[in-house]
Each structure stands twice: as C-alpha cells, then as structure tokens.
Image (cartoon, rainbow, N blue to C red):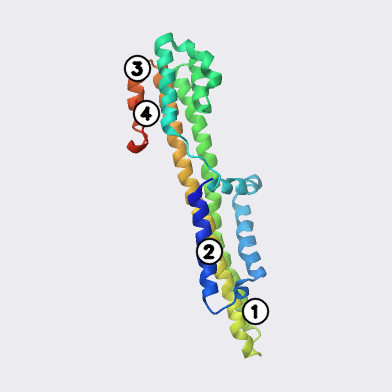
C-alpha cells in the first residue's frame, strides 16, 4: 500500500470538505448530480474517442496502482546479479542453468536462460530491450489516459457551466431564482477542477514516477545479464550496478 498516495488523497478531499463545512453554506449546496454526470461522463466519453475500449476498461486497474504498488528493492536485485556472476565466474556460465527457475525477476530469468542457451549478447540485449520498450509503451498509455481525463474534466466543467447559464438566462422572469441558478451553474466548473487536480493529474504523475522507477530496475537487470554473459568479475559488476542506486540505499559488501 502506498501510504503517501492514500494520505494525499484523503487530505485533499478532507481539506475541501472541511472548508465547506467551516463556511456558511451547507454541504448539500455543493451536491448536484447532473453537474457530476456532465463532468465525469463527458470526460470519459471524450477519452473513449481518444483510446481503444480495452484501454478505457483497463484504466481502473491502472489507477489502483497509485495505491497498490511496491517499491522494487534495487539493492537486492544487484546482490542477486552479483551472486549469479560469482557462480558463473566459479563454475562457468552453464552452471546457471540450474538456477534459472529460482530467479524471481522475469527479465533476469529470460536473459540468463538465453545466455545459457548460447544466444549472442546482441540478441540477448535486443530481446530484453524490446520487452522493456513494450512495457514502457503500456505504461505511457495508462498515464496518457489520466492526462487526457485531467484535460477533459475542466473543459466539460466549463461546458456544464455554460449550459447552466444559458438555462438560467432563458428564464429571467423570476429574479429570485437567479442566484441559485448561478450557483448550480458554477458547480460544474468546481467539479471539473476537483476531478482534474485531486484525481486525474496526481494519478498521472504518480504513474509516471512508478514507470520511471521500474525502468531503472529493468536497466539494472539488462546490464547485469550482459555483464555476466561477457564474463566480467562480480566486483566490477557490483560497482557498475551500484551507480544506479542512491548512496543511502546501497548495501555494503
């Protein structure tokens, strides 16, 4: 569970609701179902035009990663690669064949299996980087959906406001209803701003951060596998891969 994301979302919503409760207006004055339908429904409808249906249906699963994600232990990944390098240096590259099933990282497992099977370093790197590029493309698509929703929500909030103003101005016979009508018209703009800046934009930024962190782990895996295949010493591999890790997170030998 990502505590920072959960606390941030609760805090943002809590501050908005708390400010409303502290003010003189009742909370019910900020609830308008038609306005919510215009903003949320309109943003989703526009996203359906931009992306395939399967991508939109998978968006909730992507969004939940903002809260349910696990930081990869890069130091342990480096330690595992160094251990594999020590085995290959001591017993030969073919000795790693019996350890392939024990490797938890899928990229390292694929690379070591290919190396044991006799694939050239060029082929191994090409396959691994193609896999990484495919994963990065999926990550960009998920983030792009959130980015577009963040763009569309305020726009549909403005559309709802204009609709409300038109309906209000078309019925000027009752001046006492103008204030209430104006308030309802402005609610859609508020909803659009909240959806964009509390949900969609922060979710997109967090997904981008998680993707970049995952890419670092994959780069470590690729470089480690290629170094093992080329016969580099475990110490050299360790020193090379430790550069990807912040100094405070590095494990001492």
Q: Which residue is mark 1?
A: 167
Q: Quadrant of the C terminus?
A: top left
How far is the residue under mark 2 from the one under mark 1? 32 Å
Q: Is residue 228 left or right of residue 36?
A: left
How far is the residue under mark 2 from the one under mark 3? 55 Å
Q: At x 50% / y 49%, what residue is drawn? A: 3
Q: Which residue is mark 4?
A: 241
Earlier residue among tags 2 and 4 = 2
Residue 20, picture quadrant: bottom right
Local packing at callout 4 (Cα closer than 10 Å; few below 14, some 14-19, many 20+) is many
How far is the residue under mark 3 from the one under mark 4? 12 Å
Q: Which residue is mark 3?
A: 233
Dot in front, 4 or 1: 4
Say which element carries label 3. loop
Q: Is residue 226 left or right of residue 127?
A: left
Q: Which residue is mark 2?
A: 14
Say which element carries label 1. helix
Residue 215, picture quadrant: top left
């Amino acid at each position: 569970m990502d505590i920072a994301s959960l606390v941030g979302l609760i805090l943002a919503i809590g501050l908005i609701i708390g400010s409303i409760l502290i003010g003189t207006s009742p909370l019910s004055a900020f609830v308008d179902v038609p306005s919510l339908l215009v903003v949320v429904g309109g943003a989703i409808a526009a996203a359906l035009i931009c992306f395939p249906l399967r991508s939109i249906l998978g968006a909730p699963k992507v969004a939940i990663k903002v809260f349910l994600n696990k930081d990869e232990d890069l130091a342990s990944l480096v330690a595992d690669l160094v251990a594999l390098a020590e085995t290959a240096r001591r017993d030969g590259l073919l000795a790693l064949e019996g350890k392939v099933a024990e490797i938890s990282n899928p990229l390292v497992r694929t690379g070591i299996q290919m190396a044991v099977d006799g694939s050239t370093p060029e082929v191994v790197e090409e396959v691994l980087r193609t896999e990484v590029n495919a994963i990065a493309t999926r990550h960009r698509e998920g983030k792009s959906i959130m980015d577009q929703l963040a763009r569309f929500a305020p726009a549909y909030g403005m559309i709802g406001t204009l609709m409300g103003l038109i309906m209000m101005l078309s019925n000027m016979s009752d001046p006492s209803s103008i204030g209430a009508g104006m308030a309802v018209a402005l609610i859609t703009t508020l909803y659009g701003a909240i959806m964009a800046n509390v949900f969609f934009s922060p979710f997109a930024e967090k997904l981008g951060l998680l993707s970049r962190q995952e890419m670092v782990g994959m780069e470590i895996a690729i470089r480690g596998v290629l170094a093992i295949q080329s016969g580099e010493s475990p110490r050299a591999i360790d020193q090379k891969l430790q550069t990807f890790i912040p100094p405070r997170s590095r494990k001492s030998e």
